Amino acid sequence: MAIIILAAVGVSILLIISHILNHHPLGKPVPIPTIAPRVTYYGFLQCYGHLIVIPSNSIIMLNYRVRSNATIDFVGIYMAFPASIINEALTVFSRLSNPSDALIMSVYVNGKLIASTNDPGPIQGLEFAVNNSNGYIAVAYTDDDVSFPPINLTNGDVITVLIYSAVPYALPTCQYPMGVGEGRQ
């Protein structure tokens, strides 16, 4: 039941973002407001409009060097599906023999596997948003995450996130990215 509720919330967020992007009175997308979360993000990037497209069947490795003591119990990635790759992403997804293999994320701390997930939820949310949209979607934003028991980190520890995707997607990036380990409150 909780999974259904979380999926419904995720899809609702996608539909709201899609509506905002596509229903500006002048026909131009409305910038999405950034809401400051109440947690610290290490290496956090949330830059809409600057995207790196990742081809299907790719593995991306993200490394974060911890610069202070911290406790983590969650790692998430923000993903985007620009209009130019939405159809390709959904076509590849529809052809997979096991949809759960569409997106796999693994988290390592100092080379030791801490957690892994294979959740097609972000792509299923994209599919739902496209099928229930009243018009053109310029870009759909979503995220994928993995939770685990709290882990205490110290200065110098390395968090490595491996992301495999069977479908093309995009990762946000910034012209002037924040330094790794510089948290945002």
Image: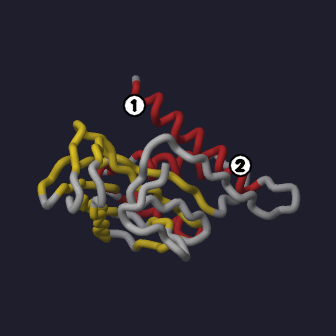
**Which of the pair 117/173 is nearer the observer?**
173
Query: Measured from the top left, where is residue 96 in percent x and y?
Result: 33, 57
Residue placed under numbered mark 2 in the picture? 19
Specify the farthest residue to the right.
26
Residue 50 against residue 79 in the figure, above or below: below
Q: Is residue 98 left or right of residue 135?
A: left
**Nearest to the observer: residue 44 or residue 124:** 44
Disc 1 secondary structure class: helix
- Residue 69 pos. (x, y %): 27, 50
- Amino acid type at circle 2 is His
Q: Residue at x 29, y 41 (%)?
A: 73
Q: Is residue 54 above or below residue 134?
A: below
Residue lying farthest to the top in this orientation: 1
From this viewpoint, which residue is outermost toward the bottom?
Answer: 175
Question: Which circle marks residue 3 in the picture?
Answer: 1
Residue occupying image coordinates x 39% and y 64% = 167
Relative depth, front residue between 45 and 116: 45
| Quadrant where the image shows the N terminus | top left
Relative to 111, residue 8 above or below:
above
Amino acid at circle 1: Ile
Q: Earlier in the sequence, mark 1 or mark 2?
A: 1
Q: Is residue 47 left or right of residue 53?
A: right
Label 1 environment density (alpha carbons within 10 Å; few <14, some 14–19, many ≥20): few
- Specify the quadrant of the image occupied by residue 92: bottom left
**Distance CA(mark 1)–CA(mark 2):** 24 Å
Q: Secondary structure at mark 2?
A: helix
Q: Quadrant of residue 22?
A: bottom right
Please give the count of numbered marks on the rendered protein.
2
x and y percentages locating residue 54 in the rendered image: 41, 72
What residue do we see at 61% from left, 61% from top?
Answer: 139
**Tag 2: Cα neighbours inside 10 Å, few (<14), some, or many (≥20)?**
some
The chosen color scheme is secondary structure
